Image: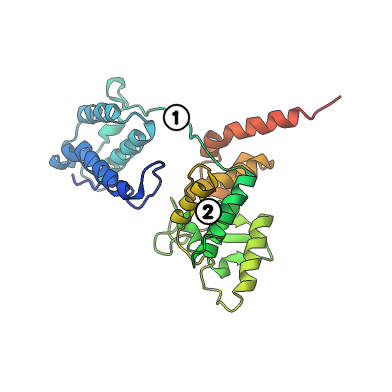
């Protein structure tokens, strides 16, 4: 059974780690994961037993204190074995045994702890990016605004064109990478995201500045802006944030403004009815509810 491992080598989300050290850390992590999966490379798919899966899971659980890596690794193994069933290599999935002694339980994951800027701090952050003096400072600031005002993933935002921006209906059509499509969806599928006022104002301003561009042109002029964000965060004295944190910022501001979690979940492109959003942002709903309750008087 051949297994290819990766560490998300393009990721820069390593708070507190110098950029020069990240490659070394990622390489060490890649080797560690290769060791975790090494035993599977010597086995034939049809010969894998439930006991081997249990032993591997126990070893992996000891290696990773957090539940996320373990759960994703387990899902990966189960998916590989499911493919084996589809291809006729075996008739059952030993990593999904229903026998109590051989059943592999998922680990409870710790809730995501978000460290997001307050509105005033965020404005200072944007100013620091815009006024950095770089030739790409304005496009970088525009990308930060676009991600924050739409909740799009960075891999979705870079493929939005002017044709996808419907000012009349007040919505953006999100298609993702033309070759791979949206996350967990088939190529060709899409979703729409409403333009909140800030998003509409940003897009109208950019369209006015670049009126000569064809409809097929990408709205964003840079594909990423992590270095600019790192520099600005350090300059204004706030916690480092990533492109994905801007997605969290969008969801947080929506919920704090009274938008219900299932609606925010749809805007983010989740297909679980709001379960993940409830897990990540549920505490915000409770805080908002308590704040609103404090305003009720008889």
| Nearer to me, 145 or 293 | 145
Question: Residue 292 appears in which quarter of the rendering?
Answer: top right
Q: Secondary structure at mark 2?
A: loop
Mark 1, other Cα within 10 Å: few <14 / some 14–19 / many ≥20 = few
Q: Residue 253, can we see it?
A: yes
Task: Quarter of the image for the N terminus: give it.
Answer: top left
Q: Secondary structure at mark 1?
A: loop
Task: Quarter of the image for the C terminus: give it.
Answer: top right
**Residue marked by disc 2:** 152
**Residue marked by disc 1:** 110
The residue sitting at 28% across, 26% down in the picture is 62
In the rendering, at what x and y percent does residue 181 appear?
44, 59
In the rendering, at what x and y percent does residue 161 appear?
53, 68
- Left or right, residue 156 beside residue 122: left
Q: Earlier in the sequence, mark 1 or mark 2?
A: 1
Question: Residue 289 appears in which quarter of the rendering?
Answer: top right
Q: Residue furthest right?
A: 298
| Nearer to me, 168 or 293 | 293
C-beta proximity under 8 Å, tags 1 and 2: no
In the rendering, at what x and y percent does residue 206 appear?
61, 68
Q: Give the CA distance from mark 1 to mark 2.
A: 24 Å
Q: Residue furthest top?
A: 101
Q: Residue 182, can we see it?
A: no
| Nearer to me, 235 or 229 | 235
118 up-or-down from 293: above or below: below
| Nearer to me, 121 or 191 | 121
The residue sitting at 63% across, 34% down in the picture is 285
In the rendering, at what x and y percent does residue 288 appear?
68, 33
The disc at residue 269 is none
């Amino acid at each position: 059974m051949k297994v290819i491992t990766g560490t998300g080598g393009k990721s820069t989300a390593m708070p507190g780690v110098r950029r020069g050290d990240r490659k070394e850390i990622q390489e060490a992590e890649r080797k560690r994961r290769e060791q975790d999966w090494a035993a599977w490379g010597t086995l034939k798919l049809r010969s894998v037993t439930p006991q081997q899966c249990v032993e591997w899971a126990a070893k992996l659980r000891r290696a990773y204190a957090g539940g996320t890596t373990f759960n994703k690794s387990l899902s990966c193994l189960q998916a590989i074995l499911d493919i084996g069933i589809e291809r006729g290599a075996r008739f059952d999935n030993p990593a999904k045994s229903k026998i109590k002694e051989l059943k592999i339980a998922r680990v409870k994951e710790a809730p995501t702890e978000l460290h997001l800027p307050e509105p005033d701090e965020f404005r200072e952050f944007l100013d620091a990016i815009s006024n950095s003096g770089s030739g790409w400072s304005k496009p970088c600031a525009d990308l930060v605004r676009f991600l924050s005002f739409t909740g799009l993933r960075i891999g979705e935002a870079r493929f939005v064109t002017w044709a996808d921006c419907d000012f009349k209906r007040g919505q953006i059509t999100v298609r993702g990478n033309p070759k791979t499509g949206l996350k967990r969806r088939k190529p060709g599928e899409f979703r729409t995201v409403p333009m909140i006022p800030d998003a509409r104002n940003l897009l109208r301003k950019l369209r006015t500045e670049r009126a000569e561009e064809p409809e097929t042109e990408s709205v964003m002029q840079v594909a990423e802006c992590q270095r600019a964000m790192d520099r600005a965060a350090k300059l204004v004295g706030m916690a480092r944030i990533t492109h994905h944190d801007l997605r969290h910022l969008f969801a947080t501001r929506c919920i704090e403004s009274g938008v219900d979690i299932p609606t925010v979940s749809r805007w983010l492109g989740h297909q679980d009815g709001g379960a993940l959003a409830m897990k990540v942002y549920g505490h915000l709903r409770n805080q908002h509810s308590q704040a609103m309750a404090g305003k009720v008087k008889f």
